[in-house]
Image: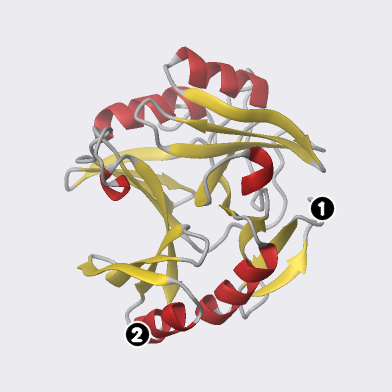
Amino acid sequence: MADRPGTQDQDGIGLGTRGSVNLMTRDLAEAQRFYGAVMGWSFRSGRLGEDFCVAQRPDGTPAAVIGAIASTLQVAVAWTPFFAVYDLDDVVARVRERSGTVAVGPLRLPYGRAALGADRDGAVFGMWQDDGVPGRISGRSPRAWLRLRTRDAFEAAIFYGEVLGWGSDRPGAPEVHYELEEVVVRTEGQQLARISSGAVEAAPDPLVRPMWRVHFPVDDLDTALRTTTEYGGGLVDVHDSPQGREAMLRDPDGALFTVTELPRR
């Protein structure tokens, strides 16, 4: 589930660095076919068993973890961020104490334990405790970024700060800043997440409800859009952003993700 170094503190509060971005799908072969074409990823078996694979960018660095577990765990097909924690039981308790929910786990998986939860407004996220050295998350971080659109960005920042240690004074804790009416979370100088207000919890349109969104960079957005439709996916929206021109896409199994065309150098 995780592929970057984590941090720890003395009382076991997870410091909330991103472990990985994970796709929970029903058909691993179909997901590999689609994302291989659209994103140019290759795939290798991971340490979590035959229902999982690690997606790799063309340079061989890890991009994501894909698991054909949506049906097994009876969860939605979706892209989900997993955050590295030191003591999963403690973090799960903190989620519940702060009016969040835990739908799955903690589960024992090869090399670690995982849980799937949601914050007070219903945005789903994962938690991962790696085996071995306490707090260790092996490998490198995926080159993706996260955006949480929620009801109230300030309240969400408090929730994740209390659960994952964001903005705390503990060594290695992600820093929290308020920029242009958004909450920006950074770790080791790199952007971890942006949180914005405006989502409606009970909206009939699921795209308006609170949710974590995973963004991947692409070199050519038009090619990504064309390949998405050729391989059975769909276009939800195209718009300009401060990062560049971007599009929200839907894969053949229904999972939403965003691709952003990086400025040409």
Quarter of the image where one finds residue 139: bottom right
Q: Position of residue 210 (x, y in %)?
A: 32, 39
Amino acid bearing label 2: Asp
**What residue did someone put label 1 on?**
49
Amino acid type at mark 1: Gly
Q: Would residue 64 be visible to someone looking at this image?
A: yes
Q: Residue 116 location in percent, x, y?
A: 58, 34
Residue 148: image x %, image y %?
35, 45
* Residue 196 or residue 248, whichever sits in front: 248
Name above or below for residue 265 compared with residue 188: below
The disc label shown at residue 222, or none = 2
* The image quarter in which residue 7 lies: top right
Question: Viewed as shown, does residue 84 lie left or right of 223?
Answer: right
Q: Which residue is drawn at 49% across and 23% down?
A: 101
Q: How many marks?
A: 2
- Residue at position x 69%, y 69% in the image: 29
Q: Which residue occupies 52% across, 31% down?
A: 117
**Which secondary structure, mark 1?**
loop
Tell me: residue 153, above or below residue 139. Answer: above
From where the camera sits, is residue 265 visible? Answer: no
Instruction: Determine the secondary structure under disc 2.
Output: helix
